[in-house]
Image (cartoon, grey):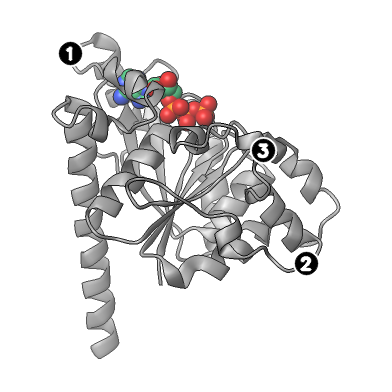
Amino acid sequence: MGKVWGIVNRKGGVGKTTTAITLSHLLSKEGYKVALIDFDGQRHSTIVSGVTEPEKLSVSIYEILKCIVMEEEIPAREDYVITTDSGVDLIPSNNKLDSFEKLMSDTTFAEYKLKEFVDTIREDYDYILIDCMPKMGTPMINVMICCDGLIIPVQSEPLAVEGMGEFLRAFHKIKSNVNAKLEVIGILITMDSERTRVSKRVKAQLQQALGEKVRIFTNCIPRSTRVPDATDAGMTICEYEPENAASKAYYKLVKELIKDGSQDTESADTQFSA
Ligand SMILES: Nc1ncnc2c1ncn2[C@@H]1O[C@H](COP(=O)(O)OP(=O)(O)OP(=O)(O)O)[C@@H](O)[C@H]1O
């Protein structure tokens, strides 16, 4: 049964898409079966994955969720999965997803609709990553209900900590009432310029405000102008410039996440056999 990880932050432009597509790519290269759900109407993961006209897709995550809401049969997998060059199964999005909240407005159990879909594919993947929209409310609750873990990219900039309190309160509510297995895997500092005063201040603020509550990855993703260049070329930074410091940091992150995962499995096995 696959692990389901949401790449989340209520803020936009913090590196969610970059992290989601790069981790998906690296996990796939490590030999895992990976699905990436683009759960954002800005559909950046879809575009970077090579879909040039997402608005022309006949089935996107929006139509899938609409079928679930209307209690209709979900389209066949081959009608919506787009397999990327690196072997990741993309479940694409387009700007119809901007009306997700409208779609959910008169729906009972609206918060469970994404989970209902994810449960239909979970058995077939080792990892399912979700590139999330920068919003609290129903979209974020859907993500928190269907995920096992959350990775929170935070841009190295002043006010990075702002809004994290509300986010963590929502996390604790969902964890204690609905989804006990939900964990914050960690806060990932992105677009870091290590030697600047801002970077040092942001790290100190995050550590002080959240360090005791959640893990902050010591491995930060450095800022590099080559990252947007890679996006522009429709690639991850790891494909575009493998020796770039940001590529190396993402590679290190994925190794750490895989190691954590295998330790989880080992401890679960130990508990089971005991
Ligand atoms: N390490 C980095 N160095 C430099 N630029 C970066 C880095 N990571 C991401 N960026 C750039 O920052 C911008 C925002 O990144 P990204 O799209 O991943 O954020 P996001 O959180 O998904 O945004 P949104 O919520 O709006 O979809 C993009 O132009 C991206 O190329």
Residue beneath the point at 82% across and 57% down: 107
Measuring from the top left, give residue 163's x and y in whole percent. Answer: 53, 30
Q: Decide which of 54, 37 is in the foreground and name it.
A: 54
Question: To which residue does mark 1 refer?
Answer: 195
Q: Earlier in the sequence, mark 1 or mark 3?
A: 3
| 81 w.r.t. 274: above or below | above
Label 3–label 2 contact, CB within 8 A: no
Amino acid type, mark 1: Arg
Mark 2, residue position: 72
Structural distance between the alpha carbons of marks 3 and 2: 22 Å
Q: Quadrant of residue 233?
A: top left
Which residue lies most toward the right here? 106
User: Residue sitting at 51 percent across and 67 percent down?
Assistant: 121
On screen, residue 230 above or below 64: above
Q: Which residue is mark 3?
A: 56
Secondary structure of the residue carrying tag 2 is loop
| Amino acid at dot 2 | Glu
| Disc 1 from disc 3: Cα separation | 45 Å
Q: Nearer the viewer, residue 129 or 88?
A: 88
Specify few, some or many for label 2: CA neighbours under 10 Å numbering under 14, 14-19, or 20 or more: few
Tell me: is circle 1 under 8 Å from ligand 1: no
Q: Residue 171 location, x and y as percent?
A: 52, 50
Binning the other alpha carbons within 10 Å of mark 1 as few (below 14), some (14 to 19) or many (20 upward) gives few
